[in-house]
Image (cartoon, rainbow, N blue to C red):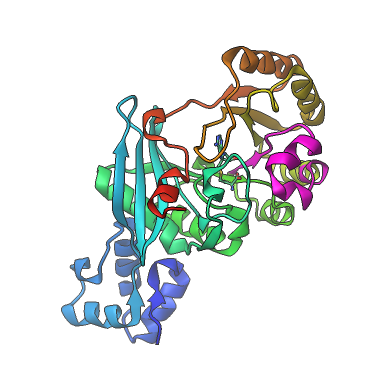
Amino acid sequence: MEKIDIRSLNYQELAEEVKALGLPKFRTDQIYSWLFEKGVREFSEMSNLSKDLRQALDERFVIRNCTIDTKLCSKLDETVKYLFELGKGEFVECVVMKYKYGYSICVSTQLGCKMGCKFCASAIGGFKRHLTASEILSEIYTAQSDLGIKISHIVLMGTGEPLDNYDNVMRFLELVTNEKGLNISMRHISLSTCGVVPRIYELAEKKLGLTLSISLHAPNDKIRSQTMPVNSKWNIEELLTACRYYTKVTSRRISFEYAMIDSFNDSVECAEELASRLSGMLCHINLIPVNNVRENNYERSNEKNIKRFISVLERHGLTVTVRRTLGSDINASCGQLRAKKENL
Ligand code: SAH
């Protein structure tokens, strides 16, 4: 019989397993705390359980972990980038960044990605599989224990499309925010999507309180379709209609991500068109000078063009920020380490 992935169970499900094993109720809290609060890697670490009980758990369940394959520490800031091995030659990337308000982690949600965005290193090599909730959690536990820190913020912006792995990601969110576990506030979590429209409607209904980021990267379908295949399935108008619905239902401001690519999407006309599409929306625009990936030829916009772009948007009353580049000396943008490791 295949062992049950115990760190993907929620509290109620764990309680049922504890009951099925004929154990007293208080064991649920003990085991839950070891797994989700302390983030143990093995049953043998559960020191307030008898040896027999630890063995019985080990026979029935598995704790999914990852191990550090590569760790790169930025000399410019305190950004740390990891390549974790999940086992069987499977690798995921994750980045920890230090901000004034605490430590933020950027986690991967899939092995590879189906979405095929042309500027993105995660698309290299295609899609392998979804990560389970426990595997996404294990990125956090492993980074926390290696660095001796407590993570306070999470961005689902690593490799993978979180809304394409909807059930596991929803489960992850439930577990990571549980007050008996890592207890991270939904307000401190951002989920980034390239625009899986039906899932945006579903997510809206959940009213989770997280920040939804939309990877827009273009002001019109003609430009967007050149780099983002998802646009042929759900175009910008369909995407923005879903976004308007999301803000209406949740009253949460949406963050639009816009990778600035030289001479591609950074003209004044692009800024004007973007402003006219987004004006009046409860939103914020985050400009990202595109990171060069060895497999493509996209160059980041120069500072003058970025400033020009910002001034057009601001003139239309939109709020704009430029993403701080952290860990630029360690190639902190996602997908590149894994692609190298797996020879993709
Ligand atoms: N699939 C999700 C989350 C992963 S990508 C999404 O598309 O949103 C996280 C963010 O990094 C997205 O906004 C993505 O478009 C952006 N990104 C990917 N490659 C990039 C690059 N080379 N330079 C700048 N941003 C990039």
Apparent side of residue 188 relative to residue 199 in the rendered image (left or right): left
Apparent side of residue 258 relative to residue 63 in the rendered image (left or right): right
Q: Position of residue 127 (x, y in %)?
A: 55, 59
Q: Is 226 part of what is drawn in magenta?
A: yes
Height in image: 52 above or below 311?
A: below
**Residue visible at 33% across and 62% down in the picture:** 65
Q: Position of residue 299 (x, y in %)?
A: 58, 27
**Residue visible at 61% across and 12% down in the picture:** 304
Where is residue 64, by image quadrant? bottom left
Query: Which span is picked out in magenta?
Result: 211-239
The image quadrant where one finds the N terminus is bottom left
**Residue visible at 67% across and 34% down in the picture:** 217
Whether residue 163 can be seen here: yes
Please name whichever residue, 315 or 76, is drawn nearer the observer in this view of the structure: 76
Please name whichever residue, 275 or 14, is drawn nearer the observer in this view of the structure: 275
Apparent side of residue 158 relative to residue 182 in the rendered image (left or right): right
Q: Position of residue 177 (x, y in %)?
A: 47, 53
Q: Position of residue 290 (x, y in %)?
A: 56, 30
Where is residue 315, by image quadrant? top right
Please name whichever residue, 212 or 32, is drawn nearer the observer in this view of the structure: 212
Q: Is 286 part of what is drawn in magenta?
A: no
